[in-house]
Image: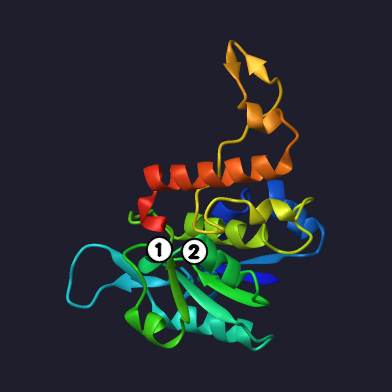
Amino acid sequence: MRIDIISVLPELLCSPFDHSIVKRARDKGLLEIYLHDLKDYGKGKHRQVDDYAYGGGAGMVLMVEPVFNCIKNLKSERDYDEVIFTAPDGQLLNQGLANELSLRKNIIILCGHYKGVDERVREHLITREISIGDYVLSGGELAAAVITDAIGRLLPGVLNDETSALTDSFQDDLIAPPVYTRPAEFNGWKVPDVLVSGHQKKIDEWRMAESEKRTAQRRPGLL
């Protein structure tokens, strides 16, 4: 998979992609990530990419021309399955969406910034808008990192144990059950007996029951 990320501050994304599972995916050649500075397509010696909003009001708006030229340049080299815009009013990112996007081959992510982007970009260039929550960030870079991480870890061969992703929270619309590790007892706190019983069928039944109970308590809307 290849993900091209367009940003006015691409340096913000260097660290998240140079560590942990995303780095492993890149090192294995399973995920390619390319960062593009929108200012490279800006106007004049100051590489302008934003301007005041028509009609007045506070805040600057990303201009349509540099975004168009950047996306056009990328599309001249390959076909893209999705052109995503990180927007607070976009489709809420969830595990099902991450699963869907992990099946794509080439994706562009345009990071929102300032007061937003010229609406003509959203109308004519974007195929999908995604939000990571009902709040506003300084820019879409962190959202792009979250989207990339959520997708990248699902690619076959990235995780050492590929069944691990299948038991994550939200994969089956349930919260994951509690997990424990050694020692079996600490400070008088004990691991549930069923987990050390060696009876896999009972362990699976316990985990399912705990997932359903935890989901009902904490995220009933998922049921």
Q: Choose between 210 and 126: the one closer to the eye.
A: 210
Quadrant that contains the C terminus: bottom left
Mark 1 residue type = His
Estimate the x, y position of residue 23 in percent, counting from the top left: 73, 52
Report the Cα–Cα distance between label 2 and label 1.
Answer: 8 Å
Quarter-of-image position of residue 10: bottom right
Question: From this viewpoint, is residue 3 visible?
Answer: yes
Residue at image coords 69%, 71% = 2
Residue at image coords 55%, 42% = 177
Mark 2 residue type = Val
Question: From this viewpoint, is residue 19 visible?
Answer: no
Quarter-of-image position of residue 206: top right
> What colouring method underlies this structural image?
rainbow
Residue at image coords 50%, 48% = 175
Q: Residues within 10 Å of mark 1 (few under 14, many from 20)?
A: many
Cβ atoms at labels 2 and 1 below 8 Å apart = yes
The residue pinned by badge 1 equals 113
Instruction: Check disc 2 and report its element: helix, strand or loop.
Output: loop
Q: Which mark is residue 8?
A: 2
Estimate the x, y position of residue 20 in percent, counting from the top left: 70, 46
Instruction: Check disc 1 and report its element: helix, strand or loop.
Output: loop
